[in-house]
Amino acid sequence: DADVTQTPRNRITKTGKRIMLECSQTKGHDRMYWYRQDPGLGLRLIYYSFDVKDINKGEISDGYSVSRQAQAKFSLSLESAIPNQTALYFCATSDLGDKGGYTFGSGTRLTVV
Amino acid sequence: AQSVTQLGSHVSVSEGALVLLRCNYSSSVPPYLFWYVQYPNQGLQLLLKYTSAATLVKGINDFEAEFKKSETSFHLTKPSAHMSDAAEYFCAVSSGGYQKVTFGTGTKLQVIP
């Protein structure tokens, strides 16, 4: 099994729909992150969480929300999806002692039509 | 504030030739620096990292990078390109202990037979 599992792998949804992307990890890491990847823009941070009771906005949090249900689970929600949220979404984890090295999931390709 | 600039969104090399992918960073404090590789339809994988120890860092698959403080650079090199090296490469920087990482916009490496 993968260390960081994202579900679904692919999703097509309609404008205005609410959608949740899920991430679970078996690394035992405290820190979890959600990034989106767009061609030519690299990865941009949406939200991050340093422990279950700590949630922080990243650089592009508008239109998104998150929930840290447990140390191992961190979900990302789009409350009302819009076409410019079409992107590849990645969940990542890190350990305080790992000096910033991330373990990434395989990504969720989201298309909003 | 921290930032990363990757010079060249696309780089082409012949199989067996030297690979050089350029990365310059900006950080107000001594940085941690990373290179990640992304193969098609996969998540990002840590290739190597600099965390203030040796300035020449060796990673997987014969890649290495040298931290040059005077030039604020962390270029990635490989002596001899293989077809399997074709992928997108991301440079990233982290400042301080809170481990938020800023990614560059990526460089796609094409290896020509």
Image (spheres, rainbow, N blue to C red):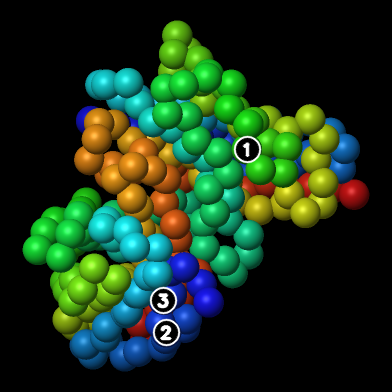
Residue B12 point in image, percent of width and height:
74, 42
Decide: is A61 above or below A69: above
Q: Nearer the viewer, residue B54 or B26?
A: B54
Tag 2: residue type?
Answer: Pro
Tell which subunit mark 3 falls on.
Answer: A
Residue A40 point in image, percent of width and height:
47, 52
Quarter where residue A80 is shown: bottom left
Q: Residue at x 26, y 86 (%)?
A: A19
Mark in the foreground, 3 or 1: 1
- Placement of the C terminus of chain A among the 4 image quadrants: bottom left
Give the farthest residue toward the left.
Answer: A53
Question: Considering the numbered disc 3 on the image, is that residue within a helix, a strand or a loop?
Answer: strand
Residue pointed to by mark 1? B59
Decide: is A56 above or below A76: above
Mark in the foreground, 2 or 1: 1
Q: Residue at x 82, y 52 (%)?
A: B83
In this rendering, do the residues under marks 3 and 2 share a single chain?
yes
Q: Residues within 10 Å of mark 3 (few under 14, many from 20)?
A: many
Question: Considering the numbered disc 2 on the image, is that residue within a helix, a strand or a loop?
Answer: loop
Tag 1: residue type?
Answer: Gly
Tell me the distance, in whole angstroms, between the alpha carbons under discs 3 and 2. 6 Å
Residue B2 point in image, percent of width and height:
29, 31
Kindly indicate whether the residue at mark 2 contacts the one at mark 3 (C-beta within 8 angstroms): yes
Q: Residue at x 80, y 40 (%)?
A: B81
Q: Residues within 10 Å of mark 2 (few under 14, many from 20)?
A: some
Q: Is residue B6 visible?
A: yes
Q: Residue at x 35, y 74 (%)?
A: A24
Q: Is residue B28 left or right of residue A41?
A: left
**Mark number for residue A8?**
2
Q: Is residue B63 left or right of residue B29?
A: right
Tag 3: residue type?
Answer: Gln
Residue pointed to by mark 3? A6
